Amino acid sequence: MIYSIEICLKEGQPDPRGEGIAHDIYDLGIHSRDVSVAVSDIYWLEGELSPAELERIARELLTDPVTREYHCPSSPCSDSSVTHCVIVTYNPGVIDPVEDTIMQALKDMGINTITAAKTALCYRINGALDSAELDTIKSRLLVNPIIQHVVEHTPAAFPKSPPHVFEIKHIDVLGANETALALIGSGYGLNPTEMAAVREYYAKLGRNPSDAELETLGQTWSEHCVHKTFKATYNFEGEIIDNLLKSTIMNATKELAMPWCLSVFKDNAGVIDFDGDWAVCFKVETHNHPSAIEPYGGAATGVGGVVRDVMGTGLGAKPIANTDVFCFGPPNLDFKQVPQGVLHPRRIFKGVRSGVADYGNQLGIPTINGAIRFDERYTANPLVFCGTVGLMPRDASHQGKQNPGDKVVLVGGRTGRDGIRGVTFASEQLTRDSTSLSFTSVQIGNPIVEKKVLDGLLKARDKKLFVRITDCGGGGLSSAVGEMAEETGACVYLDRVPLKYSGLSYSEIWISESQERMLLAVPPWNVDELIQTFAEEGAEATVIGEFTDDRMLRLFYNDTSVCEMEMSFLHGGRPQTFLNASWKKPEYLEPKPAPPGEYNDALLKILGSWNVCSKEWVIRQYDTEVQGASVIKPLTGNQEDGPGDAAVLKPVANSRKGLVVSNGINTRYGDVDPYWMAASAVDEALRNMIAVGGSLEQAALLDNFCWGNVKDEQSLGALVRATQACSDMSLAYHAPFISGKDSLNNEFEHEGRRISIPHTLLISAMAVIEDASKAITMDFKRAGNLLYLAGNTYEEMGASEYYAQMGYIGNNVPQVRPDTSVRLMNAVSLSISRGLVRACHDLSEGGLAVALAEMAFAGGTGAEISLDKVPTGEEISRDTVLLFSESNSRFLIEVEPGSQEEFEKTLRGNACAAIGSVKRSDTVKITGLDGNLVINLPIQSLKEAWQRPLRW
Amino acid sequence: MAETSALVTIMNNVNVLILRAPGTNRDEETAAAFAQFGATVTPATVNQVARAAFRLSNYQCLVIPGGFAYGDDLGAGKVLASELNLKLRHEIEPFIERGGLVMGICNGFQTLVKAGILPGPMSKGQQVTLTNNDSGRFECRWVYLTANPQSKCVFTRGIGTIYVPVAHGEGKLVAPPEVAGTLDAALYYTDSDGNRGAGYPANPNGSIEDIAGITDSTGLVFGLMPHPENHIRTTQHPRWTRRDATETSLGSAIYRNAVEWIKRL
């Protein structure tokens, strides 16, 4: 039978979960009456228990005696006029990690008569709510139908997994006409050209493919795995570009040929040297579509996935830092403007944030850098970029090689139906039906399983028990085995894969994207010790096959062959994609110049805009301190709440060297020109890195493209321009790209209209510096110090935050002038390493005015500057341009009077001028060109404007 | 005589056992914090100790570090606490009776409290708890901790005010009134001058009486929510670039006290 235990808070105990829901109900717009919510936990146990055992479980295992009390059976849940009771539980097939823990804990207690456990949450909502309001609360806050549903009573029995009846399936492609062939292909994410190649191959073999073979091809040839758009041949307005990626970004890396690049564009992450003994790797992934439909789980598995990428780089790296960049719709978007089937941006934001934080925190990885961008066009297509930095011994930095006869070993979580076809889903357009159709694509993560795998993995690596490793990510085993065995061949017995529940077919096992799994190549004589090493950490390792020498992929289920394919076809048989691309610069209206006067309100508005405002609410919920390596943290200043430019780590205890991690993203520029958007993102990532004391000596870049529909020629043209800019900037700054990723077709169809995301490029940067203790922060340090502006200002207001506040886009988007900016960055970097700089901040959104305000309130002290001293690259006659232009490659720098001479000497030959000083006052004053004050505001007001929007 | 000197050698060798469970993290920083004062640190899992692969009797200090043991399922520290009671009680009770040092940091503190080891004795079962922060959120921020000079705690002797991070969602110390008055508070959340009553965020979770750490009746068993092991060098201080970091604000002193106490035994 099923026993029900409810755990409630004792009378008078605060209920933060309930208060949070009540707050969210208020945010839904339901605030006419006093609404309060009480949340309790329900546990359902299936099996046989004596009353004493049931009571013991409730008392000893489930209840905190100080704050909680138990009721078994759970208290009756009936709606009354003032209390509405909603019980929410997971859908069948969705595995709640808590269930495993309960089963394990019961075993420890000596109770072996329980066969299954499930959990539910009970919300008691007090307040006079009508049924429409209650439905809104349920659907918008309490239940995500993708993974949860509402139940009225304790279930009579848990649904049973059906037993699996094995039956091999062959798909008739040889006899299919064109229409039928296309239809078959669409079921596996294969386009008609690809299906033609598949038919040709099987015609030669004289047989039809099995479903597992088509699945393998669909996964391996998917955009996610093979990046066919990026590797396509382009006709860009008459210019033929063969393999866009190779001819631009990868080519720049090849040309630069930096000796410190150890493994680039080969492995799961790019690897560079750290100090001769250690190497560092960096990977940034996106997990957009899953996060759109199930923000918490989608984002959590995004973190889990990129961490596994790093764990699976070389012979295994230890993740030492996470970075996160999110793009959402505006949190204050009117509910009426949210398309049907789409979650409100605020809910996506909150869900993504907690998913990312929970997973990263639980893995014990500090989150040290990030950004959040807001734009209405992200409402239906939020973007979630998760990055991980890893550290490994230098001799483990290269991808290993297996020998025929080595075992294929699967480590970690068990396999279920999670994420089936996630790869093809990730590359498709979302529609309002996506949320109901794509439930199997949502993966459920369990960070503790990943932690166990990680702990075992690093031990196994140091004992040299395996010779090669990769993660099981998109495409599951099909991609992992297919890639690892490309040069050798492999035989895999799918019935040996440990399953979460019965009922999976061989194809489902093969393509499942169940989380927390890694694939290893293990010499036979090490297998026992490897399994033991993982078991010691509580992780499961299973031999599922062996590597061969015939370059064939062979799969078996219960001794029956279900797939037999040549690796040469799997990896070489995909027909090249040909694409037409073009690009035309759009023309936007220019606003009328603002009349002369003061711009206090404009500055306050920009500081309070979603893109500029403080992200402290998010940052504080990440563990930034775990592992103890942080030197420069994301929040800085006298109150530890100012916006740091980049993070600095000291990852190796006995080395002085530091690792700087930064990012650059500004999607608005792409509306005007994707070339300058990409160039600006590179510049921003690098200048953030320089501002904390980094240098261009050993700086590596990562690209993450998130684009709209790539069937659109203009959109493809924008992609070509952005990649060309990446390549140009990489060469100019001598900063090679070491890894990258793309996510395409981020668009949503709503009422017949296609809403595409803005072209989005995230550039992440990582730089090794000689001495971490030379790093600096952006907050003003002391009254009396001089303020320098380094870098020329141009009339580049196009797509600026200032224009956005006025409702304009404009056309003069910031450009990058590497011939001067490389020299400038080197000079700034040198002056910081010589200890001549007390504070440095890069100028980005909101320009000089915002940078000055941020440095002042972060340091808790005022400042005065004059605009007539600002170095400019062209004649500028308007204060607004000097205040708010977002020209690239500029730094605001604080220098002690004693260092003035040496600083000026170091910067000689660059555009750099003293424009004012730090003041003992608590006011920021900026004098305009005509000698009048154009900004005059107390730092408290500036800080309040900046902190208010996201003080949730 | 020969026997005595052998015993002295063993005693002078400070052996610390770090107890790990699935989800433990900060074990490496904790090890480093002890090791900098010459301790020999050994990590071991609950199962290894339970099947006697490691014997507590060979160690003078048992540490349960931070993390999310078992994912904090069923409440932070709850499942590990249950394991200590069911699998390791026969090792831990005599260890404490013999005068062994026990330290629980963050998740380790939650575990000690839920296993009834703090405030103790273990036979009394769980008496206090660490529950959801008043803010309702996991928060990572730096806090000032000031040692209570009246406390028996050997870990906090001679310490003034230190500056260390917290990183938790369930760190609010709650005790029934009859227990609250009997607690030996070793550390308080204070302002930078050591004053209690500074409110949020100085007290980051709403703990009663601003208590950040408690000890048992012997002063040898100690638990605290913050992470002194994350401030053992000055460049970890969040304001070191403002030249605000001082040696006296380091968290290291707590680990030095433990090691020195053992050396003096």
Image: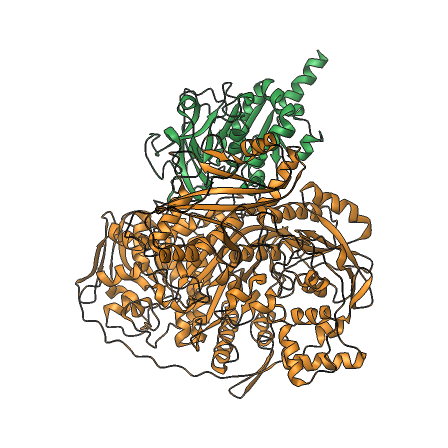
Chain colours: A orange, B green
- Please name whichever residue, A168 or A670, is drawn nearer the observer in this view of the structure: A168
Q: Position of residue A351 (x, y in %)?
A: 46, 55
Q: Position of residue A497 (x, y in %)?
A: 73, 55
Picture quadrant where residue A212 is located: bottom right
Q: Position of residue A147 (x, y in %)?
A: 53, 56
Q: In which quadrant of the rendered image does the C terminus of chain B lie? A: top right
**As drawn, is B201 to the left or to the right of A536?**
left
- Please name whichever residue, A366 or A736, is drawn nearer the observer in this view of the structure: A366
Q: How many marks?
A: 0
Q: Is residue A55 visible?
A: yes
Query: In the displayed structure, would residue A159 be above or below residue A183?
Result: above
- Please name whichever residue, A425 or A772, is drawn nearer the observer in this view of the structure: A425
**As drawn, is A876 to the left or to the right of B256?**
left
Query: In the displayed structure, would residue B205 be above or below residue A89?
Result: above
Q: In which quadrant of the rendered image does the N terminus of chain B lie? A: top right
Q: Residue furthest bottom?
A: A238
Q: Residue furthest top?
A: B1
Q: Is residue A576 visible?
A: no
Query: In the displayed structure, would residue B57 be above or below residue A836?
Result: above
**As drawn, is B49 to the left or to the right of A384?**
right
- Please name whichever residue, A75 or A229, is drawn nearer the observer in this view of the structure: A75
Q: Position of residue B194 (x, y in %)?
A: 35, 30
